[in-house]
Image (tube, rainbow, N blue to C red):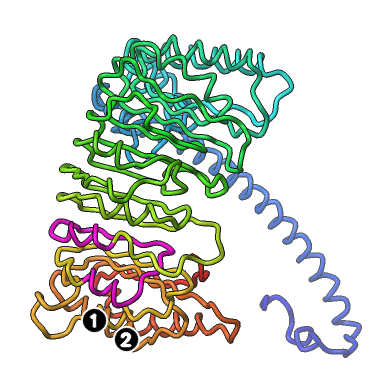
Amino acid sequence: MDPKIPTSIVRLFQTNCVPSPMDTQRISCLLAEQKLELELIRKELDRARAEVLRLEAKHFGTMEVVQKLEALRSPVRRMPIEIMAKVFEQCVQDEESQEPDPLRAPLLLCQVCGAWRDLMFSLPCLWRKLKVGFPSLTPNWENVMQSKIMSMHVWISRAKALPISLILQHPSSSPITPGALMSLDKEILTLGCRIEELSLRFSPLALSSLLTFTQSSLPHLRRLELHNSNPLPSSSDNPPPLFLHDAPNLRSLSVAWGSLDTAQFCVPWSKLTQLSLQYDASPYWNPVHNDYLNVLRECPNLKCCSIGIGMTILDADTDAVVPVTLPNLESMKVRLFCQTLYTRQFFDALHAPKLHTFEFQNVSLSMGSFASQTEPLPFISRSAETLENLSFDTINIPDVDMLSCLSQLHHLKHLRFLPGPLQLNHNLVDSLVLSGAPQGTSICPRLESLSLKCSKRVSTDRVTELVESRCSASPKLGEFCLQIAAFDYGQDSRDKTIIELRERLNQYVEGGLQLYLMKAKPTG
């Protein structure tokens, strides 16, 4: 309180008392003095605020200069051009990305600054890959095609004389006019001598008009992909048989369209190291194919093979089946579009003494999955000494058959078993628990990752025991994934089960285990 204010007046503050005539006179004098002082303080505050604003502006300006000076000293700015070029190459040639995205790189890098843009344009290797998508609908296909081709010319010109990779795709919502297809076909034919990788994803009718390049010399072609882009059944005719007249360096071939008869193909099969036939077909097509064994017999150098098994063109004579050995095959992926007798015939005839990875997936649109799919088990058993990765997706295999097969896979490191709804109550969780017995008598003693799908009735005690035994072994389990499916209409207790398992397995997560617990639909 201000000492200038008399005590008699202070006592009146916050009361309803009436000041005396003498205090009233004093109050008037004090009020005038305080108002004068308040005005002086207000002026001083204004000066202080103005000074703060001035200092803040000065601070902002100084900080801006500091940032610009620091930018001049940035290591990136002083990076030698040779190193920057290598960095850009890594950005563009991203191994994790299967397809180039021109909006990310190199075009995104070109927008950083003029120096980077000049450097990007001076590196032909950054412009070797191009992906071109054509619109679903357009009122004028000729204009659209001309624009796309001009863009391709500009892009490819920056690659100088280097071999190029092209991905051309159209979603098949509307047919492309013959004139536009003719222009694109001519462009592909012109570029044929430079193409190293080519992917065409069009309707069967469009593909039929884009294969003129196969009649020319393709000295650099290493990878060819021809896919029907229409996910729904189509009445369009299939493209004509593939005839590659001169492709001495072709190593990878992927074909997926409605009806595939490779017996009519002319392809350097013996040079292929990667082959995919009908694997990327749509389940809606009901894909058809001939006997794959005849083709595989001509592919002794295959390392990776992806097959889609559907309806066969001709019923093969089981008595005439000749075994096929692929001495260099390391990875085999099979998708099952329908259940046929050919599946067993195919696997019974196939031998792969160096197989490391096998994946078997049911993609049929039929309700649920087939009752039993044991056809590949003998093939797997024949590769027991080398097999390290095994995956079953929406596949039903009886416990006794599954365990008999797994008991032979002593070198298996990665196991993925996602059964269909008919096999959710399997006892694989119990069977994979490691006991104190020697490793030679345990099932898959060297597992490093395990992925299972079970019903909601799975025992949390047994799951915990499984993880505990595997994490205590050598090598110990590094990754465990459990999908819990609810096939009936009872109370869904999966959330409770997942919470309980997380708590019980937390100690192993802290020890380095990657744990994934999730709810799943019965069919996947």
| The quadrant where residue 285 appears | top right
Label pair 2/1, CB-CB below 8 angstroms:
yes
Counting from the top left corner in percent of width and height, residue 338 is at: 48, 55
Q: In the rendered view, would you say 380 is above or below 26?
A: above
Q: Looking at numbered disc 2 in the image, what kind of residue is underneath it?
A: Arg
Q: What residue type is labelled 1?
A: Val
Above or below 140: residue 271? below
Q: Residue at x 40, y 68 (%)?
A: 372
- Residue situated in front as seen by the camera: 307 or 473: 307
Q: What is the x, y in percent for residue 110?
A: 45, 24
- Crowd tier of the residue under label 2, counting other residues whose Cα lies within 10 Å: few below 14, some 14–19, many 20 or above: some
Q: For mark 2, what is the residue? A: 462
Is 391 included in the stretch rendered in magenta?
yes
x and y, in percent, of residue 415 in the image: 28, 65
Left or right: 204 as drawn, with respect to 330: right
Element type at mark 1: loop
Instruction: Indicate whether residue 405 is drawn in magenta.
Output: yes
Specify start and end residues of the magenta stretch as a single range: 377-406
Could you tell me which secondary element the residue under label 2 belongs to? Answer: helix
Q: Is residue 319 above or below residue 197?
A: below
Distance between mark 2 and mark 1 Cα atoms: 8 Å
Quadrant position of the N terminus in the picture? bottom right
Q: Depth check: 3 or 78 in front?
A: 78
